[in-house]
Image (tube, rainbow, N blue to C red):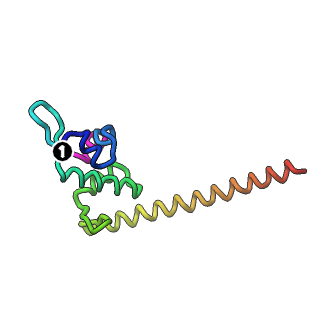
Amino acid sequence: MRISALARRTGVSARALRYYEEKGLLVPERTSAGYRVYTEEHVETVRRIRILLAAGLNSDMVREILPCMVADGEFLAPGCEDLIAEFERELQRIDTQIAELHDVRSALTGIITAGKALASR
């Protein structure tokens, strides 16, 4: 299938698919004329890429781990044991960011509350 068909099948724009290819996440076959040719396997690869990106992983990390990911029903699972520790580190990083955002939100709420109190005097 051509890139437009893959885009329709996956709900991902052709531009995003070209980006995935540029980043080494998606490797289509090429015709002798240079046209990209995608298979059903590429549909699944794009689905996996989208899941990993939605989980907050960047494209470089996705490129590294994609070969080790296996389908486990609706989720992907790490097929290489060392990935579990890497995912746990990523989860900790996200938890730290969430805690920092809560602190920022509290500070901003305090500033707004103080501003409203000052304005009502």
In the picture as drawn, the residue positioned furthest to the left comes out as: 32
Residue at horizontal 67 percent and vertical 59 percent from the top: 106
The count of marks equals: 1
* Secondary-structure class at tag 1: loop
What residue did someone put label 1 on? 38
The answer to whether residue 22 is above or below residue 86 is: above
Question: Label 1 neighbourhood size at 10 Å, few (<14), some (14-19), many (20+)?
Answer: some
The percent position of residue 71, horizontal first and vertical second, equals 25, 65
Residue at horizontal 54 percent and vertical 60 percent from the top: 98
Asked whether, in this view, residue 3 is left or right of residue 103, the answer is left
Under mark 1, the amino acid is Tyr
Q: Quadrant of the N terminus?
A: top left
The percent position of residue 80, horizontal first and vertical second, equals 24, 66
Magenta-drawn segment = 19-26
Q: Residue 14 is drawn in which quadrant?
A: top left
The answer to whether residue 78 is above or below residue 28 is: below
The percent position of residue 118, horizontal first and vertical second, equals 85, 50
The answer to whether residue 32 is above or below residue 43 is: above
In the picture as drawn, the residue positioned furthest to the right comes out as: 121
Asked whether, in this view, residue 76 is left or right of residue 103, the answer is left
Residue at horizontal 69 percent and vertical 53 percent from the top: 108
Asked whether, in this view, residue 93 is left or right of residue 83, the answer is right
The percent position of residue 111, horizontal first and vertical second, equals 74, 52
Residue at horizontal 24 percent and vertical 40 percent from the top: 3
Residue 47 forms part of the magenta stretch: no
Which of these two is toward me, 23 or 39? 39
